[in-house]
Image (cartoon, grey):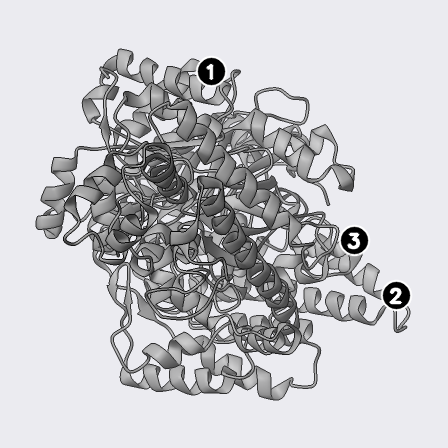
Amino acid sequence: MSVPNALPAEALLAPSIPGLSPFREKGKLTNAAQSARCSEAASRAKEFLLDAPQKIDTERLTHLLDVYREYAQEPVIVLRARVFERVLQKKTLYIDDNPLVGTVTSKPAGVYPYPEWGAEWILREADQPMVSHLGEVELSDEERATLIETAKYFQTRSAEARARELSRELHGFDPRDSVAAGLITETAPYTIGSGTLDYATFIRRGLGDIIRETEGRLKALPLTQENASKIDFYRAVLISLNALIHLAHRYADLAEKLAAETGDAVRRAELLEIAEVCRHVPENPPRNFREAIQFWWFLHLGNQIEQSGCGSSPGRIGQYLDPWFQADKAQNGFTREDAQAWFKCLFVKILEYGYYQGLISARTNSGHTGHTINLGGLNAAGQDATTELDSVLLDTQIELQNIQPTITILYHDGLQEDFLLKAIELERTGLGQPQWMNTRLIIERTLARHAKNGITIEDARASINMSCVGTGVEGRTAFIHEGGTFNLAKCIELALHDGIDPGTGFFVGARTGDARSFKSFEDFYGAWLRQVEHLFKVQRAFGSVSTKALGETIAPAFRSALYGGCLERGKHVFDGGVDYYLYFVISNAGVDAANSLAAIKHLVFDTGRLTLGELLDAVDANFEGHDRIRTLCLNAPKHGNGDPAIDALVRRVYDDAFKTFHAAGYSYFGDHIANIEAYSLSIHNYYGLKTGALPSGRQKGRPLTDGSVSATPGTDKKGPLALIQSAAQAVDAVKYGSNHFNMKFHPTALAGIGGARKLLSLIKTYMDAGGSHIQFNVVTSDTLRKAQANPDAYKGLTVRVAGFSAYFTRLHKGVQDEIIERTELTFDC
């Protein structure tokens, strides 16, 4: 089920069907009128969402418990499909004034808990206010009681509990000490997104055709031991796909009921069209753009209901929906403005989606949902793949300025200047979008990662950005978070303290000796690297048992069916069914580690201005009473200034971490080797709260450095060209699964056509030098300080955090301060 190449519209679409939109034929609502209503609905929805708190919806939990008791004898893949089916059959539906129908939960801005992944955070936080990036999460006393009851049921049945049980049994350790120390985070307790599913194929074929294919595969299999798990998988797929069609029909029923009740003729016509559309899609291929975008939303809705979490991306939606747009333009007088109006409705649907999984998740992700839309890139023949809808999507985001979805430009030298200038227009809004990814490098990375799988250059050209800054083949790469995240700066702290975390007193590292006894920089570097080796032994072992635990407890049938490979193999995503895997763990604080190593090298071993004992005493005191030493540390060489020595040390840190990670062994899938992704989300703030003072001069509790190749805020002193020179060489971005680079510009730097072309020139220079990813904040620190002081006056102010945009006033203060402190660049440097 490969991602199809672009096909002519006539190959994808049935002939235009008279009567599809009868109210339009009667003159009650033209395309233009419908577009106006879409735009008005989107504006109202966004205004509501700027103020709306998240609300926990426990309706799903009742169905979850009922199904687990009713179908306890079923294999987990079928059990999970039955949960999905029951929720879609029974969830409370509503239709608001957005003509795109379907919501994840039964209430606006609602979020579902998923205690079958992890219940501990619920029991830990249930008797106190639950606080997300949007403020306190609302739930009634009755809902709180339901949440606690369900969490108790899953306390010993969840993926989290199973992973810890396996870790103790197979490896003799519990990861919670390492988590408490800020060395790693866990994966199993937290639901995660899918990457990008094969939306293109499913929209083109319709679910009815996929169901017929699956029924054929099931009937062809004799019941043998070898086939038993495949049979269960196909049973679960059929349950899940039919459940989504049933949900669409329920929305059709509701729309017809509401149409019969309203006295507004225009609203009645709108509701009757909703009913007709929902009777047709997703069971059948769409007949026009309006049906295609509703089909997409139903698929995405099912994906999020089954397994809510960060990282389910639309991918190249402007390219795989373009045939329907072009056909509607030719046949029905549909315009760019009409398409933009429907995208506005889609964008506010995506903006409304959220999740809440406890305080740790809120701190590390800041509510980021990872709905990344890709524009540009190359087609299978190696030509520019940009479509007219790609430009429409830019126009939509320029107007709405939503934090979600987020926009990625798949950059290459063949992009047209008018398209690039429109992207810079979006940058000027201050939204922090688009982010820019190097298409050439992404393709090279995909070819290297999957050479053993026989990947072709044509398939590699379908590589896109998924979630934050990860990459994979659209529709064919599973997005599996193997082992959480890890903190390279914590390994500096552990090397200074013989493997003991000073904050908790836990022994979570390796015995590397008294740091005061080290005679050379290489002695200390070796101690740091041994801490990294120990970290990876823990992380890789726990990552593998976590993946096994997820497969045993929450195997997803619906999203598995929508990946390329699973139907063909009869295996779900945690059973090796997908064509390619983005099986990863996230690296954090590499620049902090390198800056600390540079300070030790420079101050202790190169210049002799300090002894390691003096430096250690100052660090242990959080530099209090050691102002002179802290000044020396802050003035030591820092990444981001084009200094060849420190640039080489940063690269050494990342190269050695990569080698050490892979020396720790294979992933759970054997020949699918896990890889390191290098980015931060807001994990750098979370780890900063758990990391003591560092030899770089950073004090205890302060955020660590954002991204993976960004400069520590305020330490890049030589302007943007020096910064991109350092960033481009810091990480081997072909070996690593990603990297992540933030810059902040004063708005005047981008003024006029001259400012736009300077920024485009900077991007090209960075990409040509081997840079993988770059993104920009275009805002003054003064504006951010005013927003911090008066949040109500700046509730719509957006910033780029790390692979995602967020409402500034809703961020944790540590993240706010870190963004304020980022160097404010101009092109005059």
At horizontal 50% and vertical 80% (from top left) the residue drawn is 63
Q: Does residue 645 lie above or below 499 as drawn?
A: above
Disc 1 and disc 2: Cα gap in Å?
51 Å
- Secondary structure of residue under mark 2: loop
Q: Nearer the viewer, residue 446 or 333?
A: 446
- Secondary structure of residue under mark 3: helix
- Secondary structure of residue under mark 1: loop
Indicate the amino acid at tag 3: Glu
At horizontal 51% and vertical 82% (from top left) the residue drawn is 154
Q: Point out which mark residue 376 bears.
A: none
Report if the CB atoms under discs 1 and 2 are less than 8 Å apart: no
x and y, in percent, of residue 639 in the image: 36, 32
Q: Point out which mark residue 568 bears.
A: 3
Q: Point out which mark residue 221 bears.
A: 2
At horizontal 41% and vertical 70% (from top left) the residue drawn is 506
Query: Which numbered disc, 3 or 1, marks the residue that appears first in the sequence?
Result: 1
Q: Nearer the viewer, residue 796 or 664?
A: 664
Query: Which numbered disc, 3 or 2, marks the residue that appears first in the sequence?
Result: 2
Indicate the amino acid at tag 2: Leu
Indicate the amino acid at tag 1: Gln
* Residue 18 visible somewhere in the drawing: no
